[in-house]
Amino acid sequence: KARKQGVAVVEGNKYDLLELHRAAAGSRDQMAKATWHTIEVIDEAASTRDARRVLVARGDDGRPHAAGYFVWDDDAMYYLVGSSDKDLRSSGATSLLLWTAIELAAERGLIFDFEGSMIRSIERFFRAFGGAPAAYSVVRHTPRVGLRVERATKRAIRAMGRR
């Protein structure tokens, strides 16, 4: 769809991504600043190793529709952060951008890791590419007394169910 509309994916720079990210963040400016600081730290390390790429999907008028920041190691390419122009999200540019990154990973003999999302619409979008979801663990500190009470309660409920 994006190609039919004249969208092409080209190599960009972190400032192309920042421009889209700031516009998309809007009132969440603090979140945008925190994300940008993290990207700066990662970019410093990844650029010295030639292990990162910024891709930008631009319309034939030069306007950026979407951008993504990708890093890789010996095994995989990771989609760290992406953003898109809210007025152009229906152009299909993000799909084309990610497909281009997947092709780049394949050329390098790497797997592509979307890094997932807890936002259902984004998760559905990522699953549409046909990848296999991978489980992850969340570890939380639980006070010892509370943990004992919870375990005892679960055991009691299970024991009642067996009777």
Image (tube, rainbow, N blue to C red):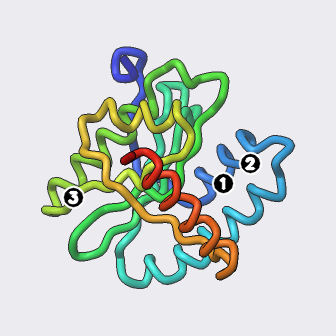
Front disc: 3 or 2: 3
For residue 18, which numbered disc appears in the image? 1
Relative to 100, does residue 91 appear above or below in the rendering? above
In the rendered structure, which amino acid carries the disc numbered 3? Answer: Ile
Front disc: 3 or 1: 3
Q: State yes or no: discs 1 and 2 in contact (Cβ < 8 Å).
A: yes
Residue in front for this viewpoint, 122 or 134: 134
Q: CA distance from mark 3 to mark 2?
A: 29 Å
x 44%, y 52%: residue: 158
User: Earlier along the polypeptide chain: callout 3 or callout 1?
Assistant: 1
Relative to 15, does residue 142 appear above or below in the rendering? below
Residue in front for this viewpoint, 62 or 40: 40
Read off the residue under disc 3: 111
Q: CA distance from mark 3 to mark 1?
A: 26 Å
Which residue is outermost to the front? Answer: 163
Q: Is residue 103 left or right of residue 118?
A: left
